[in-house]
Image (spheres, helix red, strand yellow):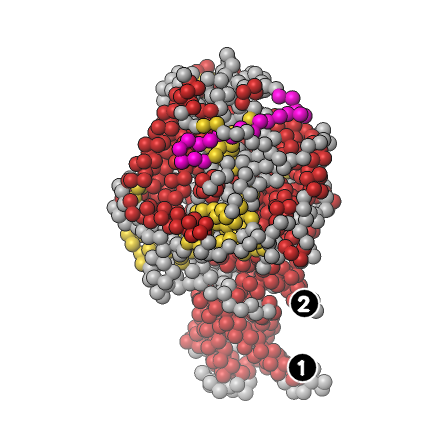
Amino acid sequence: MKITVRIWRQKNAEAKGTMVSYELDEVDENMSFLEMLDVLNEKLTLEGEEPVAFDSDCREGICGSCGVVINGEAHGPEVTTTCQLHMRTFKDGDVLDIEPWRAGAFPVIKDLVVDRGAFDRIIAAGGYITAPTGSAPEANSTPVPKEDADRAFEAATCISCGACVAACPNGSAMLFTAAKVAHLGLLPQGQPERDSRVINMIEQHDAEGFGSCTNIGECTAACPKGIPLDVISRLNRDLMGALAKP
Amino acid sequence: MTEQMIGDYHVVGNEIHDTAAPSGPIEKRWDERKFSAKLVNPANRRKLHVIIVGTGLAGASAAATLGEAGYNVTTFCYQDSPRRAHSIAAQGGINAAKNYRNDGDSIYRLFYDTVKGGDFRARESNVYRLAQVSVNIIDQCVAQGVPFAREYGGLLDNRSFGGVQVSRTFYARGQTGQQLLIGAYQALERQIAAGTVTMNTRHEMLELIMVDGRARGVIVRDLVTGEIETHTADAVVLATGGYGNVFFLSTNAMGSNVTATWRAHRKGAYFANPCFTQIHPTCIPVSGEYQSKLTLMSESLRNDGRIWVPKKAGDTRPASEIPEDERDYYLERIYPSFGNLVPRDIASRAAKYQCDAGKGVGPGGLGVYLDFADAIERMGRDAVEAKYGNLFDMYARITGEDPYSEPMRIYPAVHYTMGGLWVDYDLQSNLTGLFVAGEANFSDHGANRLGASALMQGLADGYFVLPYTIANYLADGPFEKIADDHPAVVEAREAVEERINTFLSINGTRTVDSFHKELGQIMWDYCGMERTEEGLMKAIQLIRDLKAEFWTNVKVTGENEELNQTLERAGRVADFFELGELMCIDALDRRESCGGHFRAESQTEDGEALRDDANFAYVSAWEYSDDKPILHKEPLEYEYVEMKARSYK
Amino acid sequence: MIKKRVPASRSTVATKYAMAVSGLIMVSYLILHMYGNLKVFAGQQKFDEYSHHIRTFGEPILPYEGLLWIIRVALVASIVVHTWAAITLWRRNRAASGYQGGKRYHTSKGARGFQRSYASFTLRWGGIIIILFVVYHLLHLTANVVAPGGASDSPYERVVNGFEIWWVTVSYTIAVLAVGLHLWHGIWSALTTLGQNYSSTRLRSRLTPLSWFVSAVITIGFLLPPWAILLGITG
């Protein structure tokens, strides 16, 4: 099928970007979205033009590297990662607008590639359990109720792709931050640092320049892993509890 | 005649031996090594600098542990975050000899299964240690908050995996790799915040710096600015994963590459058993020219699915129109006792034979059916959905077909590489001060890796082995500081710069990917599931010709001083050419079939792999040479497990 | 651009707590206010009595209009806090959403979710409409400064005189609808901010029907008296 793509081209962080249009005549419906971009890049390279820079790695929907905004929707029209989106979702003659994640805390590096280092720094601020190697007790010494373990797992499925930030009209990373607070806070091993964790992570979240949550829920709707919205409410409870302590 | 021809491709050097492993009873060896290892005073650790390249399970866990211990660590990864390393994509689980099921598992049994599963091409000492520390890994991960599957009583759940008879696999639904990696990543981030680890994301190692016979640093390229940076240290650890992407299509991530280990190899590190690759039978087949990677589906599908092809070659009818008596359930027919559950390599090869015979299904005839119609009838659709729903969804998303109403199509794909840089018991390569961990080394899986053992090995190396053995090395440091204008540094740097300039100046007519795809096809055809002397020799010639064309006709756009993904790929593909050739030479030398390596010339009358222990019970450790690679053999001795042939009929 | 960390007690989440609490204070007031309004249906005497009674409530412990002033101070404080929080967060969020040349995403396909458009419109513009209306409303019915339909010392007469004029009722209706829409998202958001959502999506949450119900009750409760007066059912 024939597809027209309009892609955000930006040479580097300082340059001014713009949307540039390209035509692709032979797009197979079984191609993944990123394979369609690969085909475009092969074509551009042979024509002596700069190929479009975009991040992708595992292409199995788990590493969280890929992610672009397609026609205004993070990861495109289906609830999945960009790499798992296939061209059969679109039809012959479609025009696709492809843009990078847009957020103050995610500066564009080039074309569709953004810097998501802010996520790592939020984790570094407190998204862990202090458990030096070798100090761990026998694994089955602390039973974890299955329900808690399952909910912790659900929150831990976050792949840090950043779609929540791109979809949030406020550019907030609250779903990302709250998913980690919930994952660790639901487990007995995470209790000793529960208060300091939420305080430090929220402080870092704000320092990175992310926006505030207005409980709209666009993040959950865009999340390829379906991180539930109530993790945010849980973070709010945890922070309230932590601040209430002297 | 043959000997002479094979001899044309390599020369044989001295035997090598692992001198770091203690002798004595196998269960005492690791304790003894830990006791004999030198310790470093905590006050001195800050002055000792370690570089770790790669932040997957092995790299991240090693960096976190060494940082915690107080060493000064610098880490690099090519991804934009350490959490994205390809360990993240492992689905199945992680083995540990906890014996929580009370089903007769033990450290010894895990050791035994791993040695046997590796088809007697791994070292007993290393494997035993792996089994020993496996139990600590689970403790460590649980303490970090890894949300393993649990039972209603709140204790950890286990399942049996990869055909073993005990349930020793711990798992976190279909994303054990991601959960374990996040645990290690979080520990790593904690050390980054504490200032013990300096993390450099979007940096790729392009050269190893050797000074006076010691590995002392790396040259890396900042992938955003293109800046070529020099980093020196007292020791260098490579935890850069496997090289399956030499096949272009594999289940590896797009960026997975051999460059770090290959650069070290070119500086003198031995590359061991490069031809040992694992091919996984249940991947989603290629759908067209444009295919960029392959996706694995859990092997567990073979528990209830039945594999078949049409009896008639070239049958293009849809599956639903092929009557029962015109279907060939070939695994059930050939291997009546194991049926669809034969080991990975047998299932893979059988699928290849069917497709070679023209019975393959789907685009290009490269696929066989994996049919759940019987399972749905027997168990009901709901039960099948509960058990395999997420896999069926994944299949439907990728292929656009509904696996509940028509059979899935599967085909084998390259999944894991058992070979890697040669290391001793201390995980130190033959280059002093260069340590190698995880899939990047060769040590524990022999010729074939058991399911759920890759995660175990990565974390064993990073959390529990390397931190002891590298301390023993660092105890002699800190070594003399190396200035940026040291001749060895300047030489390494200039080599990197020259290579980049060459790529950018060729300005030919073919893209990097087109070369990579062609190389991958050669490797798949001649050095894939079945290898023959004739094919391997042909492949070597094809690779050499293609490599020559690459260096004169590749087109790399853009410049160095920017994010340039084409340039990144060009460097990786250039190294894959050299690796591919060595893989073929290694496969040519190993005139036996073992594990994932099947030489058509070495099979039993009924087509089963035939190992040749008398002549090939050795590790092939290859030394780089501009002329012919030099083969150093490390003889393998089995004191505990008796060498036996396997049978699945 | 990483900024300096500020204490969590001054974080965006803490600011939201302030917004949520001040908002809920105003919602509580609205419910009381609505109850009072409905007294219109009991006739002039009861309504004026009620109006007088809230001024003398708590006497002699409280001075004349004591309770009213406590409520007024609390309300003014809530409005100040609520508005300050709204402006602070709005400015921050605009910077956080990474606009490029006046637009965030340049696509013309604007697949903006209904929820997103609705909430941002009603909360921001709705909030401004409500503030303007409150000023007018106080001048009219509390301070007796603006007097459409004729001033009076009887609160009941002021109400009836005003709402007999169609445009007074219509503008009042627009303002009340703005309040209702504001609360539709606002109550849900406030309770969620205070940690009370336990559901994976907004639609599944019990807070969603609760906030619809409360906002509907408040809207209808406030609209009944003026329309009854305009249509001549009462007054």
Mark 2 → mark 1, Cα distance in angstroms: 35 Å
Query: What amino acid is labelled 2 in the image?
Result: Ala
Q: Assign a secondary structure to mark 2.
A: helix
- Residue B630 drawn in magenta: yes
Mark yes or no: residue B416 visible: no
**Disc on res. B583:** none
Q: As rendered, which of B572 and A130 lies closer to the eye?
A: B572
**Disc on res. C57:** 1
Q: Residues within 10 Å of mark 1 (few under 14, many from 20)?
A: some
Could you say which quadrant of the image residue C211 lies in?
bottom right
Q: Where residue B519 sits: x, y (%)?
A: 37, 33
Q: Where residue A70 sits: x, y (%)?
A: 38, 51
Q: Residue furthest top?
A: B605
Q: Quadrant of the N terminus of chain A?
A: top left
Whether residue B442 is situated above or below residue C165 in the rendered picture: above
Residue mark closest to the camera, 2 vs 1: 2
Query: What amino acid is labelled 1 in the image?
Result: Phe
Badge 2 and badge 1 in a common chain: no
The chain under label 2 reads A
Residue at x 64%, y 35% (from the top left corner):
B21
Q: Residues within 10 Å of mark 2 (few under 14, many from 20)?
A: few
Which segment did they paint magenta?
B624-643
Q: Which residue is mark 2?
A: A244
Q: Is residue A245 left or right of residue B565?
A: right
Q: Where residue B206 sits: x, y (%)?
A: 44, 47
Whether residue C122 is situated above or below residue C108 in the rendered picture: below
Residue at x 46%, y 42% (from the top left corner):
B267
